[in-house]
Image (cartoon, rainbow, N blue to C red):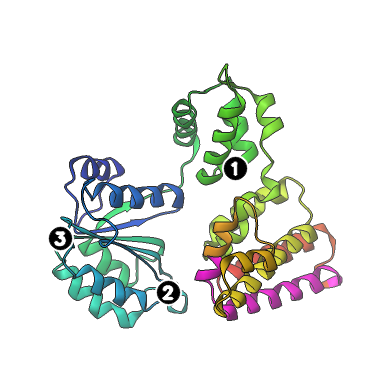
Amino acid sequence: MPEISKEQLRNHIKTGSFAPVYLLHGGEAYLRDIAARTIADRAFAEDELREFNDDRFSLSDPDDMVRALAAAEQLPMMASRRVIRVSDVRVAAAANRDTLKEDALPRLEKYLADPCPSTVLILTADELNGNRKATKLLKQHAAVVEFAQLEGRELEDWVRRQFQDYGAEPADGAIRFLIATAGSELQRLSNEIKKLAAAAMPEGLVTVEMIEAVVPHSRELSNFDLTDHLIAGRKDRALKVLRKLFDDEAEPLMLLGLIASRYRTLLMAKELMDHGVDRRTVAKRAKIFGPGADDVFAAARRTDRTRLTAAINKMAAADLAIKTSVGGGKAGSEMQIEMLVCELAEL
C-alpha cells in the first residue's frame, strides 16, 4: 500500500473511511501519538460500546504482537468496529534491538494479507529500518504515514497555530525566541504554550520578556527529554539534545549526575513494580512526583531491569573516565558523555 500524507490521513478521519491497518512512524512522536489517538476516537460513534472494543498493546513485551493480532481478529461487541493500538514498535538495524521479533512475522504476515474488515489496527513505530523484512512487510500492506520532526518555518507555523487555538498572539520575535529557549520538541512546546497563553491573559499578547520569565531553559532537561530518547533508543535525537545542552555550557558531570539519577529512579520503580507494589507506594519510595510522573512510570514499564543495570554500570565507567586523565578537560569530558549517550541508546 502506498505511503499516504498527513492530509490524506486527516481525510480518512474526517470521512470515517479508515484503512484496516495504519503504520505511523517518524521522529515527531507527539504528532504521531495524537494521530493514533484521534483515529481511535473517531472510529467509534457516541452510542457505541467503546470499552470492549478499544485495546492497547505495547511491544515492550514482544509477545503482545501475537496477542494484539488475536484481538484484531475478534468481532466487535455492540459497536461497528474494533480498534487495536500497538505501540513501541521498533525494527532496528540490529535485530537484537527489535521489539517486533522475527518469530512474530509469519503470524503478522498472515493477518496483513487478510485483515479483519471490522478492525482498525494502528501500529506506532519508534524506529523502522528500511532494509529489514519486517519493515518491508508493514509498508507493503499498511497505510503508512510519516511524522517527520518539524523544523524551520513549518515548526514556527505550528507554534503560531497553537497560540491562536488558546486565544493568544505572539509578539514579534516571540516564536523564534520560544523555540530557541524550549527546543523543538512539540510536547514541551505545547506545555509551554499553554502556560504562556494563560499568563498573557486578559490581553493575550505573548512577549519575549514573558517567555524569559515563564519558560525554563532547555538545559533543565524538562520532561526527561534526554533520558526519554535514550530509553527509547532514539540516538540521533538524544545527541541533538545533548549538543544543545553543551552549547549552553552545561557541565558534563552535572549532566552525568542527572542522567544517572533518572536511571536509578527508573530501576527502583521497575523493581518495585515487578514485585507488585502499588503505584502510590512506588511513587513515594522512588520519589516520583509532579507532571512528569506518568512518563516515568511508562518508561519503567517498557524497560527491562537488565538494561537499566547495564546502563548504570556504563555511567560509573564514564564517571571514572571523566575524573581521571582518560577523559580529562572540557573536550575530553564532553566526549565521554557523548560516547555514553551513544552506548545507552544502543543497549
Quarter of the picture holding the N terminus? bottom left
Q: Nearer the viewer, mark 3 or mark 2?
A: 3
Is residue 331 visible in this depiction of the protein? no
Which badge, 1 or 2, is on the more N-terminal residue?
A: 2
Whole-percent x, y for residue 139 in the image: 26, 62
Closer to us: 325 or 51: 51
Place residue 157 in its image quadrant.
top left
Disc 2: which residue? 98
Please tell me whether residue 89 is drawn above or below residue 247 in the rendered image.
below
Which badge, 3 or 2, is on the more N-terminal residue?
A: 2
- Magenta-colored span: 299-325
Please tell me whether residue 116 is drawn above or below residue 47 in the rendered image.
below
Place residue 322 in its image quadrant.
bottom right
Whole-percent x, y for residue 104 in the image: 30, 79
Q: Residue type at mark 1: give it.
A: Gly
The magenta stretch spans residue 300: yes
Question: Are dots 1 and 2 in contact, CB under 8 Å?
Answer: no
Whole-percent x, y for residue 171 in the image: 58, 20
Disc 1: which residue? 183
